[in-house]
């Protein structure tokens, strides 16, 4: 069993009623000590999971500001309880475990867990979590809005135009849908999303990942930059980060982002190393960007077969810089190679691309065949019907 000692830390004054459900006495005692050490916390311990799940969750939600659940003792029961608590929306849901793998962490996120502790417990982390629970930030975010859609842009090869498409798509999505949209640049250690949009960023995705213990909707919104269109942007750092990002921190960033924004667009570059993360577990759609070339189609075929074979319509294949004339392969051969037809063909328009690059204006804001196709992709992602397309075009030109 993992060491259950507690690292020392500080706390701020709070007033919070907390229910702790933990059938395992050692783990429950360690968590109880950490919670009781915080001023203003009134704690009640449950040494077993009571029967009557629906009634239990309703009573807990009515009587307690926060509920902390052991997810190791009976994982299936714990998940159902957490989901029921989240559905009531009146309490701040937390969980703890001796250790959790990626699938377990994603499952907890989907169940609505706001804070997740592992052993050895860190008192600073516990204190910060209780402060957030007392402020009501998490509960407000959970009840005020459903989780936003996570849309991931991934390249079959470097140089396929992932960043250009992702950044322009996000901008079009913001304006077409008129809903809050966040663009995250995961092209670490270097990324060009901010440059593509012609904006400067004071903070970057590294700040969010390094301060993940503080990360909530309010903190995230304080470090993003904004394009004139209203699009929120969390860019890549201007300098090489000192260390690789913690996978758990990335998962938390994505979860918080989806609770804070209606749409979250991620430029993942060609980072197939993130396949095992929540990025691809939580996403509503993956846009696989490729070009009609031997190397690109070969890579795309391998990615589809080995990584995304179980994906259905949520895998959207995008043929970028597509020119009908002079192709080595026709549409039938391309579909056969990719094992499915491409949903989108973004035309090759070098003049339009060069013009927007030279004047530092996002491509989607200037009328062109490329811009129109990207707007079509954004409208489809937002569920905008054909009758609204003309209206959307004029919103983009405002």
Image (tube, grey):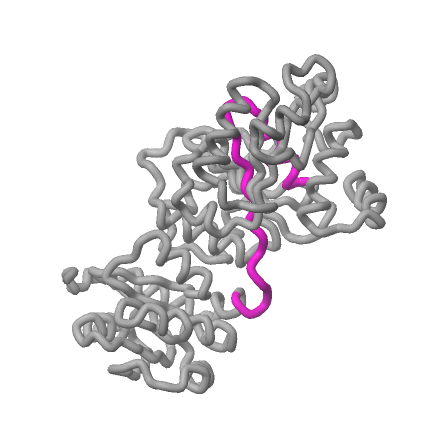
Query: As drawn, is 25 to the left or to the right of 79?
Result: left
Residue 154 belongs to the span the image colors magenta? yes
Q: Quadrant of the N terminus?
A: bottom left
Quarter-of-image position of residue 173: top right
Residue 194 visible in the shown view? no
How many marks are shown on the rendered structure?
0
Whole-percent x, y for residue 322 in the image: 68, 23
**As drawn, 130 above or below 239:** below
Query: As drawn, is 59 to the left or to the right of 22?
Result: right
Whole-percent x, y for residue 34 in the image: 24, 70
Whole-percent x, y for residue 221 in the image: 53, 52
Q: Residue at x 50, y 47 (%)?
A: 223
Q: Residue at x 46, y 46 (%)?
A: 279
Residue 278 visible in the shown view? yes
Question: Residue lying furthest top in this view?
Answer: 326
Which of the two residues, 152 or 397, is positioned nearer the viewer here? 152
**As drawn, 295 above or below 176:** above
Which of the two residues, 81 or 207, is positioned nearer the viewer here? 81
Residue 376 belongs to the span the image colors magenta? no
**As drawn, 133 above or below 322:** below
Query: As drawn, is 246 to the left or to the right of 328?
Result: left
Q: Quadrant of the C terminus?
A: top right
Specify start and end residues of the magenta stretch as a single range: 142-171
Which of the two residues, 146 or 175, is positioned nearer the viewer here? 146
Q: Residue at x 73, y 34 (%)?
A: 373
Q: Residue at x 54, y 18 (%)?
A: 294
Whole-percent x, y for residue 267 in the image: 53, 37
């Amino acid at each position: 069993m993992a060491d259950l000692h507690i690292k020392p830390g500080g706390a701020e004054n709070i007033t919070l009623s907390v229910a702790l459900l933990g059938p395992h006495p050692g783990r429950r005692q360690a968590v109880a000590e950490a919670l009781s050490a915080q001023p203003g916390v009134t704690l009640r311990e449950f040494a077993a999971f009571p029967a009557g799940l629906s009634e239990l969750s309703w009573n807990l939600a009515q009587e307690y500001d926060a509920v902390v659940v052991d997810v190791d003792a009976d994982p299936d029961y714990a998940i159902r309880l957490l989901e029921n608590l989240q559905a009531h929306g009146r309490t701040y849901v937390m969980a703890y475990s001796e250790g959790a793998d990626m699938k377990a962490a994603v499952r907890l996120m989907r169940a609505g867990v706001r804070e997740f502790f592992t052993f050895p417990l860190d008192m600073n982390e516990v204190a910060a979590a209780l402060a957030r629970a007392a402020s009501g930030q998490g509960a407000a975010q959970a009840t005020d809005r459903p989780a936003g859609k996570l849309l991931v842009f991934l390249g079959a090869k470097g140089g396929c135009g992932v960043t250009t498409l992702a950044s322009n798509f996000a901008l079009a999505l913001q304006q077409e849908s008129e809903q809050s949209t966040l663009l995250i640049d995961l092209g670490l250690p270097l990324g060009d999303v901010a440059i593509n949009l012609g904006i400067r960023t004071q903070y970057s995705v590294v700040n969010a990942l390094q301060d993940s213990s503080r990360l909530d909707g309010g903190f995230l919104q304080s470090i993003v930059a904004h394009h004139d269109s209203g699009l929120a942007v969390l860019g890549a750092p201007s300098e090489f980060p000192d260390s690789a990002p913690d996978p758990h921190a990335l998962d938390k960033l994505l979860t918080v982002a989806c609770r804070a924004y209606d749409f979250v667009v991620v430029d993942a570059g060609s980072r197939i190393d993130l396949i095992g993360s929540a990025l691809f577990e939580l996403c509503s759609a993956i846009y696989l960007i490729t070009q009609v070339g031997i190397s690109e189609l070969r890579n795309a075929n391998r990615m589809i077969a080995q990584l995304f074979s179980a994906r259905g319509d949520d895998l959207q294949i995008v043929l970028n810089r597509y020119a009908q004339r002079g192709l080595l392969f026709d549409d039938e051969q391309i579909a056969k190679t990719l094992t499915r037809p491409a949903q989108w063909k973004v035309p090759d328009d070098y003049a339009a691309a060069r013009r927007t690059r030279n004047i530092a204006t996002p491509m989607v804001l200037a009328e062109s065949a490329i811009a129109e196709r990207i707007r079509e992709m954004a409208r489809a992602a937002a569920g905008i019907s054909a009758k609204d397309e003309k209206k959307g075009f004029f919103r983009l030109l405002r």
